[in-house]
Amino acid sequence: MIVITTPTGDIGGQVLNALLESELAGGEKLRVVVRDPAKLADPVRDRVEVVPGSHRDADVVDRAFAGANAVFWLVPPAPRAPSLEVAYPGFTEAAARAFTTHGVEHVVGVSALGRGTPVADRAGLVTAALAVDDLIAGTGVAYRALANPTFMDNLLRQVDSIRDRGVFTHTVVAERRSPTAATRDIASAAAGLLLDRSWTGVGSVPVLGPEDLSPDDLARTMSEVLGTPVRYERQSLEDFGATLAGYGVSDAFVRGMVDMMRAKEEGLDDGVRRTPDTASPTTFREWCEEVLKPAVLG
Ligand SMILES: NC(=O)c1ccc[n+]([C@@H]2O[C@H](COP(=O)([O-])OP(=O)(O)OC[C@H]3O[C@@H](n4cnc5c(N)ncnc54)[C@H](OP(=O)(O)O)[C@@H]3O)[C@@H](O)[C@H]2O)c1
């Protein structure tokens, strides 16, 4: 039995689809934990066991992990949380206990790059995500943390600005190159780890994308693929924080986002070398053609 959290989310949904399309060893079953089962597509709901509720809650994970061998674990973004401790390790506490109670053998979690870098302990959301990895690793379960850079897919939040004004924003220097990965590659790495569970112990699996790119590089490729000029506008950390606060994001989450962006500028995502094992296949150009362009064209 493999349990998948966030089956209605970007990564969780793609993990579920990948597993549904795979040969599951020995007739292994899939179970999803979902707040609103009506959000699952009918053909999906017919092929999985459904545990309704939030995977933060002890009674829900107790039901979800009974008889489970492996779990895909993702902490949802919680922009209104009173603290990052509540949003990340706090969200995972009941599950960590339930992994042990129910003898879950393998867990694959969605985490972030940064462990071992000098800024790891002041990187806001990433520091909190690394604390989740430590919490899960401390249970004794075999654990792989997917160590992710900034997602290419974050740009989908700026589709209106890209289409209407030819502008996208971020906070890093225009020429600063960093890794970026497509969520489809992150989901595929998760599905691979869930399907072949010959791994043991604790470790991280970086998903670095095929190349480091700067905001200017992204603007150039978007302009070419969309056939219309797109330029990068750098936002100060103060303006970035004020924009988030304007959307009703909690003080703690704003601080966490700002600290994470500052840490990215200071090398948070630069600690892992790209090798055939840490690279992931989808290029930014492919992602623009297959995901961004259809979204921009509506
Ligand atoms: N964006 C980045 O660049 C980046 C980089 C590194 C790591 N990450 C990590 O990636 C994760 C985000 O993944 P994603 O993009 O796949 O997320 P997403 O698309 O925003 O999906 C969020 C999922 O969480 C569920 N959810 C929301 N609040 C919940 C709650 N209180 N209880 C239970 N379920 C809840 C949602 O379900 P409903 O349908 O019920 O709302 C949905 O399935 C975060 O952990 C983040 O820290 C992000």
Image (cartoon, rainbow, N blue to C red):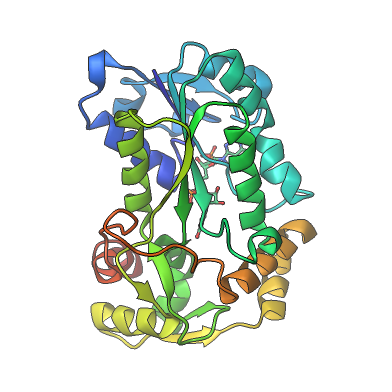
Q: Spot the residue most to the top.
A: 67
Examine the rendered structure and indicate whether residue 136 appears above or below residue 47.
Answer: below
Vertically, is 262 above or below 84? below
Look at 69% across and 45% down and name the residue there. 87
Residue 245 is situated, as x and y percent measured from the top left of the image, at 73, 66
Q: Is residue 75 left or right of residue 128?
A: left
Q: Position of residue 69 (x, y in %)?
A: 43, 18
**Image quarter for residue 170?**
bottom right
Q: Could you tell me residue 237's position as x and y percent?
A: 67, 78
Q: Nearer the viewer, residue 28 or 53?
A: 28
Q: Residue at x 38, y 53 (%)?
A: 183
Q: Quadrant of the C terminus?
A: bottom left
Q: Which quarter shows the N terminus? A: top left
**Residue plotted at (61% across, 56% down):** 126
Asked if residue 31 can be seen in this view, the reply is yes
Residue 51, above or below 74: above
Vertical placement of residue 99 versus 274, above or below: above
Regarding residue 250, the answer to whether it shows in the image is: no
The residue shown at (66%, 75%) is: 240
Nearer to me, 145 or 30: 145
